[in-house]
Amino acid sequence: MAHVMSQQDTRRTRLVVLDRDGVINRDSTEFVKSPKEWIPLEGSLDAIASLTRSGFTVAVASNQSGVGRGLLDRRALHAIHRKMRRCVKQAGGLIDRIVYCPHLPNVGCHCRKPAPGLLERLGRLYQLSLRGVPVVGDSLRDVEAARAVGARPILVLTGNGAATREKICSRHCNIETYENLLAAAEALVSGQAGCGRDEA
């Protein structure tokens, strides 16, 4: 079962969904296991603040198999998310909801990306169709989960993004791509269609 942490119960419809590790904060092959290890990427907090000011509702959908691996418990994960929200708030932004999958990759759950469960959960929570909703990630699983629900996949080149672009070019050459979350946010705020756009 996917888990959700809600900041408020507003029901706005200009939704944008962000992956966490490699998009908002530095990724780690050792997993982010504590608030101290959660380090925002340059420009990511300003990006979320810009989206918030422009009327977007920002949600996060994240695989967190470190919980299933026993590397951290839910209390530590929630502490990490409290720090993330606090840093975003200090920058002038808001993360409205966080949904995450704690399961191991081999469990076969419906919530771990590339499965669409996390995004479907957000669709139910906000009572809206996800068709065309921007979903920003750095990995193939983010792109595939977005495509599975008819959302608008956006790849950023931070985290695993550069390697992902090379991996998927043969199948998704027109994937909308930006250097980082700040560049993606600027495009969304300005209303650029972005089909096939590449700012790398």
Image (spheres, rainbow, N blue to C red):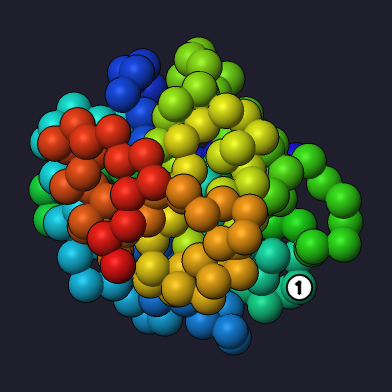
User: Within the image, what quadrant is residue 193 found in?
Assistant: top left
190 is higher (above) or lower (below) than 129 = below
User: Within the image, what quadrant is residue 16 found in?
Assistant: top left
The residue type indicated by label 1 comes to Arg
Q: Which of 35 and 176 is in front in this view?
A: 176
Q: Looking at the image, can residue 76 be seen?
A: no
Residue 111 in the image: state x and y as whole percent: 71, 43
Residue 11 in the image: state x and y as whole percent: 36, 16
Name the residue: 19% across, 65% down: 43
Name the residue: 31% across, 18% down: 12
Residue at the extreme bottom: 30
Which image quarter is the N terminus in?
Answer: top right
47 is higher (above) or lower (below) than 106 = above
Which image quarter is the C terminus in?
Answer: bottom left
User: Within the image, what quadrant is residue 50 found in?
Assistant: top left
Q: Looking at the image, can residue 103 be seen?
A: yes
**Residue at mark 1:** 69
43 is higher (above) or lower (below) than 47 = below
Residue 140 in the image: state x and y as whole percent: 61, 59
Left or right of 112 in this view: 109: right
Name the residue: 51% across, 54% down: 173
Q: How many numbered callouts?
A: 1
Left or right of 129 in this view: 168: right
Q: Residues within 10 Å of mark 1 (few under 14, many from 20)?
A: few
Q: Which of 196 and 43 is in front in this view?
A: 196
Residue 109 in the image: state x and y as whole percent: 82, 46
Name the residue: 74% across, 74% down: 70
Left or right of 96 in this view: 141: right
Under circle 1, the secondary element is loop
